[in-house]
Image: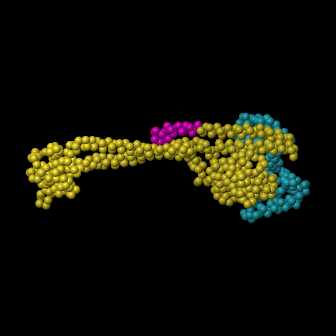
Chain colours: A yellow, B cyan
Amino acid sequence: MREFFKQAVRPSLVRSATISFIIVAALTMFAEVTLVILKYGLSRDVLMTTGAEHEAEVLAEYLQLGPDGTLSLVLPQDVAHPFQRYPHDYGYQAIQQDGVIIASANAELFAGTRFNPAWNLDSSVRQIQRKSLTTALVMKRAEFGGAPIYFRITLGRDPADLRWWLMHDEMLDHVIVPMVPLTLAMLIANIFALRRSLRPLAEAARNAEAINAKTTGLRLETDNLPMEIVPLVVSINRALTRLDQVVGFQRDFTATVAHELRTPLAVLTLQLGQHTSAGNDSGLIVAGEMTHLVNQLLNVAQLEASTTDAFESFDLADMARQTVSRLAPLAVERGREIEFDDYGSPPILGNRDAIAAAVRNLIENALRATPSGSAVVVACGPGARLSVRDHGPGVPEALKTKLFAAFTQGLQNAGGAGLGLAIVAKTMELQGGRAWYENLADGCVFRLDFATPATSTAAADCNILS
Amino acid sequence: MKALLIEDNVKISNLVASGIKGSGFEVDRAFSLSEAEEIMALSTFDVIVLDLNLPDGDGISWLKKIKRWDSCSNVPVIVATARSDLNDRIIGLDTGADDYIVKPFEIGELLARMRAVLRRPGRGLSAVLSVGNIEFDAAAWRLTVCGQMVALSRREMALLQILLTRAGHVVARESLEQTLYSTEAEFTPNALEVLVSRLRRRLSEAMADVSIHTIRGVGYLLRLAQP
């Protein structure tokens, strides 16, 4: 399943949601900009009038009260500049309620126009046709110290592009400043909300990773999952139930086959035993080989169907000593010696019987390989490891890469099907450890490195189960 | 010696029964657990050979039941099964079986196991233990090799008795030390080795055809010496 996800790289949900969100925000901003342009850009008159109103508001900001109580308008250079540079195009007047003009620029532009503060207008807009040019004449009332000040502005050809600066300011004030922080805030909130909703899904995925044919009874949690994802997880859990049934069937099937195959073999062995005399036991030898093969095939099948449910914590040295003890009569009968060294090891978590069978396989191989009179040494530890050393010819170079594969024989004419080391490798894989070997100057040593409960993934599976 | 064979497969039952008979045992046969109970009500047995998958029940639960009966509590039981997932721990700890043998097996192996369980203290064959040309009378504490008496110390006798009782199997070093030196607060680490080598010398001087093998790190194994 992991491979499947690796192959099909899919865009992340967060990423696509973010992209959609940015597109919507950009479209909204574009619409706002279009509206502003439509509002100001399509009619020169509107733009001029609004520009003049805006200029009046700007000027009002620079009113000052002098020490003698008189009002004055002190403009910074950048504000005053267009009025000085283009005296035929821009002009202003600041007029008190009593009609006194406290500041003005290019007053001749207002010639022929009338204004009386007594009209008490808040604002007024007029278009004046001057030669071929339409000029905007705008009055805007401002307040300073409780008294009204009337600003009159006239705008002609606008060579300083004041109206475009107005549009720039409008965009900044009404589009950029409110929209950008809002968009960013919503984007972050959106990502956060998505991530938070998906967190239980990541947890479910981690649990699902731990599921394999070796862990039965494991189901994904539906608590805390977003409503939209619950049906998927419920369906997965139903599929897991069906999977458990299949694994259960396979296990029962293996046990049944074991019984069914052993019974006729028992009849065959007993019958051959009746008709066998010393020196004429070839039938029994063949029956023995067949039994060994059936046992190994069943061993493989049982391993395939076995689960971590059968895991238990056990003493490695104790198990190894028992296995050596059981095989010692065979060793002595074949004129070999067998020895056991215990260097101390922590408790191992695994299927004790399967591991004992793996150790038995290694010892039987070693007894076949080691020459008569030499010893097979089984050593446990230090640490979570076990080794079986013989004084045989070692593993041929040609078999190096496929020694632990099924149907490979290390020794020629050994009489087996070459399943022993495959069983060993499979058993160790299930435990979370590994099997390997080294050729020595005078023999070979097979090593089993066990996963300890702290590092074992199999152990982690067990924890999830509980 | 009388054995009860409980096995539902007629072919296996015939073959095992004829094999046991040929070795001097009397055999009664049952093909189900209920039949076995009927036979046991009429007669007593020295050893029971029990198959586990029987038509009217599971041999293990039945074994637990009969082990509580006074008449059966001391009768050795050998479980003969096709179930390889069982192991000696389960058999030994949970059911009260004395030994087990996985099918398929040769009749010689079953007979060896029957003799071994009968040799244990308090059982039918316990009075005289014999392997090869040696005979050990456990009641009189007397060893003879080819009919000739051999003098041994009490501790050598005790060691030999344990090894003979488990002949063909490894006896753990710890269990030997516990049995032989249990009354001593301290004993030297190589005391057992010295004792074993002394016993070896005595047996070899007496021309006994058994040998005691050291399985380093595990224990000792007594078996018929190889020709």
Q: Is residue B92 in sight in this rendering?
A: no
A436 relative to A287 in the view: left or right: left
Question: Farthest residue toward the right?
Answer: B147
Q: Does residue A8 appear left or right of residue A82 in this picture?
A: right
Q: Give how far across and how far down residue B26 sits, in percent.
A: 84, 40
Q: Is residue A234 magenta?
A: yes
Quarter-of-image position of residue A14: top left
Depth check, front residue: B51 or A79: A79
Q: Nearer the viewer, residue B94 or B17?
A: B17
Q: Is residue B171 above or below residue B67?
A: below
In this image, A15 relative to A242: left or right? left
Asked if A23 appears above or below B164 in the picture, the reply is: above
* Front-most of residues A462 and B96: A462
Answer above or below: position of A14 versus B183: above
Q: How many numbered circles does the render carry?
A: 0
Can the viewer see residue A215 in this picture? yes
- Judge whether residue A448 is colored magenta: no
Q: Nearer the viewer, residue B4 or B219?
A: B219
* Quadrant, the N terminus of chain A: top right
Q: Residue at x 15, y 43 (%)?
A: A129
Residue drawn at the location 73% of the way across and 60% of the way down: A441
Q: Position of residue A337 (x, y in %)?
A: 78, 57
Where does residue B194 sit, x and y in percent of width and height? Answer: 79, 63
Quarter location, residue A219: top right
Name the residue rendered at 72%, 63% in the picture.
B185
Relative placement, left or right, of A140 versus B201 is: left
User: Which span is picked out in magenta?
Assistant: A222-242
Identity of the residue drawn at 38% across and 46% down:
A187
Where residue B58 appears, x then y in whole percent?
71, 38
**Principal secondary structure, stretch drawn in magenta:** helix
